[in-house]
Amino acid sequence: SYVLTQPPSVSVAPGKTARITCGGSNIGSKDVHWYQHRPGQAPVVVISYDSDRPSGIPERFSGSNSGGTATLTISGVEGGDEADYYCQVWDSTSDQVVFGGGTKLTVL
Amino acid sequence: QVQLQESGPGLVKPSETLSLTCTVSGGSISSGSYFWGWIRQAPGKGLEWVGTVYYSGTTYYNPSLKSRVTITVETSKNQFSLRLTSVTAADTAVYYCATHPRLAQFDYWGQGTLVTVSS
């Protein structure tokens, strides 16, 4: 089955840029979606279709999918960005949703 | 804006069946605008997709759960439901329902409901 690989943790100082990667076989051929998940809350989609930012999501959040890796970039990181982040695709080969294992973003 | 609310027992005994319902407001399941999904998160673990249903009854399931999962829709009540049989402690999780447009991202989510499997 299809596997998405994320680093377990990323740490960044306030005001700096955080990059969270998501790797998978031929991931460039898939639409990658990213979620922010804070404890006790429902996940929120912050990037859909590789790089689309839903209404209400700050411009600091951006996404890309090239070179075999999808990346969520958070510019000017704030304390409120501290959360778990998950990438997700629909694998049309097996007709199933696949989530990455999640990355805990820590703001130093 | 679509809103979703999970409901069901918070405690289920091992080997029994977990049943949850998601009630949709602000949109009609029978409109065909969305697919409807269930996602769960066990304590200390990541998000896990359980399955997705369309208003027509078409379903897609996580292969690792497929033998135990059934997701159905009840358009007259604007609800969709999850049944998970033969539960064990490993099924203890917060269960979320969500919209799943075009089988892409999950954009609207319920608040989640904790189901504990314990005797």
Image (tube, rainbow, N blue to C red):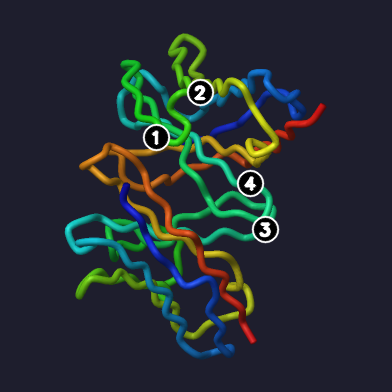
- Mark 3 vs mark 4, foreground winner is 4
Q: Residues within 10 Å of mark 2 (few under 14, many from 20)?
A: some
Q: Residues at marks 4 and 1, common chain?
A: yes
Q: CA distance from mark 3 to mark 4?
A: 13 Å
Residue in the foreground of this view, choosing between B104 and B60: B60
> Does B72 sit above or below residue A97?
above
- Mark 2 vs mark 4, foreground winner is 2
Q: CA distance from mark 4 to mark 1?
A: 17 Å
Badge 4 marks a residue whose secondary structure is loop
Task: Identify residue for label 4.
Answer: B42
- Counting from the top left corner in percent of width and height, residue B112 is at 63, 40
Q: Residues at marks 2 and 4, common chain?
A: yes
Looking at marks 1 and 2 on the same chain, the residue that comes earlier in the sequence is marked by 1
User: Which of the image's four quarters has the C terminus of chain B?
Assistant: top right
Badge 2 marks a residue whose secondary structure is loop
Res B68 label: 2
- Mark 2 vs mark 3, foreground winner is 2
Q: Residue at x 32, y 47 (%)?
A: A1
Q: Residue at x 68, y 21 (%)?
A: B15
Res B29 label: none
Looking at marks 2 and 4 on the same chain, the residue that comes earlier in the sequence is marked by 4
Under mark 4, the amino acid is Ala
Residue A48's image quarter? Answer: bottom left
Res A39 label: 3
Chain designation of label 2 = B
Q: Residue at x 38, y 73 (%)?
A: A21
